[in-house]
Image (spheres, rainbow, N blue to C red):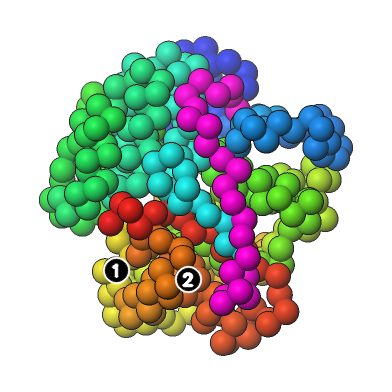
Amino acid sequence: MTTTHLPSHLRLACDSCGSSFDEWRWRCSCGEPLDFATDFSPSAPTPDDAALDYRRGLWAFDEFLPTEPHATLGEGMTPLVEAAEWDASFKLEYVFPTGSFKDRGATTTLSVASELGVERVVEDSSGNAGAAIATYAARAGIDAEIYVPGSVKPAKLRAIERAGATPVRVEGDRQAVTDACVEAVENEDAWYASHAWNPAFFAGTATFAYELAAQRDWDVPDAVVTPLGHGTLFLGAYRGFRALHNAGWTDSVPRLYGAQAAGYAPIADARHRTLDETNDVADGIQILNPVREAEIHEALDVTGGDALALSSDAVEDELDRLHRHGFYTEPTCAVAPAALRELRLTGAIDADDDVVVPLTGSGLKT
């Protein structure tokens, strides 16, 4: 779907070829992903807590966001808690309305869709993003069609259906799901609410960084370790920490580490030798061709971080450990704390480094 005469704050631009667009489109004519042409940044040089109404959740940071909250369920300001067993802090992203961090991107994406007068959106997802888009589409009064793998977990499929969205099950691997969805986008002129392509989604996941900095009195940690598939949260964190630093609200940008599933680890594979096995436990990040791969490598290089691949055994062991300590998460979520354990063993993260790990999805969905 295209929308003519976009408002100036929603104009799109391509970093790869330099093109800009006044009409909404899901990718550039050169084939690369698009971002907003506007550099959203606060007018104040330093944060004023009195001006930030945290009761608005992530929308307290509206100066960093491209639109108003047209589709919201009070999401954001997730708890930041100590995790002594890991010598780190966990940000509990699984307490969002639909049980995953994907609500950050869904609220901004459907708010932009609502502002543009979109009547129907499509998305492809292994489960969490689909449930989030379906739920926020329902909140916005917009029809949604969600393409999912044939093996999608029943709990996630129910969440999509009960929000009134139409699930489309596609047999084959995760790429086959995306291919089927893209075909529908192009043939049916539908609005693609993609968590991998849509710039509004990344504007939403960037609020992870804003919240984390605010919860720490505008001091950022030494390192942040996130799951890494398409890089939805990883890149959101990178963009958010970079925006805070550019605005002068923080003094530095943390080192960013991405945790991938062995056998589905293109970023880690490109940087060093990885495990010769397949991790089918962390099903939420089984992405072989991340859309924004170049930006992921840029974020790793600029921040001095790294990507590594985790085995099924490492993830299962970490999941058991999380559950025993009161963190009831889904399996994919365990890749990040498992990666932290390995990064400490190799010395990439020192014992005295200040580290934050997001726990991204609820165990209630498995």
Q: How packed is label 1: few (under 14 Cα within 10 Å), some, or many (20 or more)?
A: many
Q: Is residue 336 left or right of residue 61?
A: left
Report the residue marked by disc 2. 325
In which quadrant will I find the C terminus? bottom left
Label disc, if present, on residue 102 of the rendered structure: none
Give, as a three-letter code, the residue at label 1. Val
Q: In this view, does 239 lie to the left or right of 149?
A: right
- Mark toward the start of the polypeptide (2 vs 1): 1
Residue at figure coordinates x 57%, y 47% from the top left: 78
Q: How packed is label 2: few (under 14 Cα within 10 Å), some, or many (20 or more)?
A: few
Give the magenta-colored segment's residue range: 64-88
- Disc 2 or disc 1, which is closer to the eye? 2
Q: Distance between the residues labelled 2 and 1?
A: 20 Å
Give, as a three-letter code, the residue at label 2. His
Q: Main secondary structure of the magenta part?
A: loop
User: What percent of the width, then of the height, locates residue 351?
Assistant: 68, 82
Q: Does the magenta stretch include residue 65?
A: yes
Q: Which of the 4 image quadrants contains residue 98?
A: top left
User: What percent of the width, then of the height, locates residue 260?
Assistant: 42, 68
Residue at figure coordinates x 21%, y 57% from the top left: 173
Report the residue marked by disc 1. 281
- Nearest the viewer among 112 and 160 is 160
